[in-house]
Image (cartoon, grey):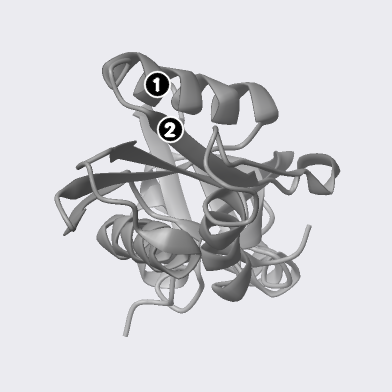
């Protein structure tokens, strides 16, 4: 897994050009079914619109798709796709809905309008960098738990959950490349009494160590 840029949340935009209205929608997705589901949702929402243009880029199978949805070839879907490509954005989908205002915009006008609406929707969503993390479960005694927060502060760690039962069970994720050093610190601090189990791997937003 390698780091990549994606969208932080859903974003929207509204652009009016010569009485034509362009509505942009952008979202983070992780599969083609999810991307198509988002496109279908916007199409249903704007079933009365003349065009629902879309583009998406996925890490899964290096998938790239776009559609002009009835606009002249190269004037809509490709400009929307270019916003993702130029931003280096992956696992993202953009839909731009157009309500025709009665005035033809020409090739250049369409390219500009679709690009601007897509870019504004992406800016509203915001971009984040996802990096690879390793997931672990730590089982330890209550006295040892009192030391743990202090040991974590120098590492890029995300605490997913902490359960207080017969023992304390911490589910956490740590940025790739940091666990070996942390493991040594934990073993030394606990005299080897912390039980560590690797759960898996995932991509997550960049997290810096606490200052």
Residue at image coords 20%, 42%: 101
Residue 164 visible, this orientation: yes
Residue 148 visible, this orientation: no
Q: Is the residue marked by circle 1 packed among few (<14), some (14-19), or many (20+) residues within 10 Å?
A: some
**For residue 197, which quarter of the picture?**
top right
Relative side of 85 to 150, left or right: right
Q: Earlier in the sequence, mark 2 or mark 1?
A: 1
User: Whole-percent x and y of residue 78?
Assistant: 62, 56
Residue at image coords 22%, 42%: 102
User: Whole-percent x and y of residue 56?
Assistant: 60, 45
Residue at image coords 46%, 79%: 154
> Which residue is outermost to the right?
61
Residue at image coords 33%, 52%: 104
Up-down relation of residue 178 to residue 62 (above or below): below
Up-down relation of residue 9 to residue 179 (above or below): above
Give the residue number, with chain letter if any, for mark 2: 52
Relative side of 147 to 72, left or right: left
Label 2 close to label 1 by CB (< 8 Å) = yes
* Quarter occupied by the N terminus: bottom right
For label 2, the SS is strand
User: Whole-percent x and y of residue 87?
Assistant: 54, 73
Q: 81 and 195: which one is in front? A: 81
User: Whole-percent x and y of residue 74?
Assistant: 63, 56
Query: Rounded to the nearest whole Å, what is the CA distance between mark 2 and mark 1?
Result: 6 Å
Up-down relation of residue 194 to residue 197 (above or below): below
* Quarter occupied by the C terminus: bottom left
Dot label at residue 43: 1
Task: Please tell me how many numbered marks the rendered image carries.
Answer: 2
Q: 6 and 87: which one is in front? A: 87
For label 1, the SS is helix
């Amino acid at each position: 897994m390698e780091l990549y840029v994606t969208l932080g949340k859903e974003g929207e935009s509204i652009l009016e050009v010569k009485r034509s209205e362009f509505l942009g929608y952008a979202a983070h997705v992780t599969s083609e079914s999810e991307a198509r589901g988002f496109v279908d949702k916007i199409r249903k929402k704007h079933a009365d619109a003349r065009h629902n243009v879309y583009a998406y880029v996925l890490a899964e199978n290096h998938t790239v798709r776009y559609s002009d949805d009835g606009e002249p070839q190269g004037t809509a879907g490709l400009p929307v796709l270019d916003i993702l490509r130029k931003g280096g954005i992956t696992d993202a989908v953009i839909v731009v809905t157009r309500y025709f205002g009665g005035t033809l915009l020409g090739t250049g006008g369409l390219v500009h309008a679709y690009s601007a609406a897509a870019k504004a929707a992406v800016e509203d969503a915001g971009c984040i960098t996802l990096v690879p993390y390793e997931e672990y479960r730590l089982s330890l005694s209550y006295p040892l738990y009192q030391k743990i927060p202090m040991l974590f502060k120098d590492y890029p760690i995300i605490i997913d959950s902490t359960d207080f039962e017969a023992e304390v069970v911490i589910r956490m994720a740590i940025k790739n490349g940091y666990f070996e050093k942390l493991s040594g610190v934990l073993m030394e601090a606990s005299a080897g009494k912390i039980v560590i189990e690797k759960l898996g791997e995932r991509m997550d937003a960049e997290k810096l160590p606490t200052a």
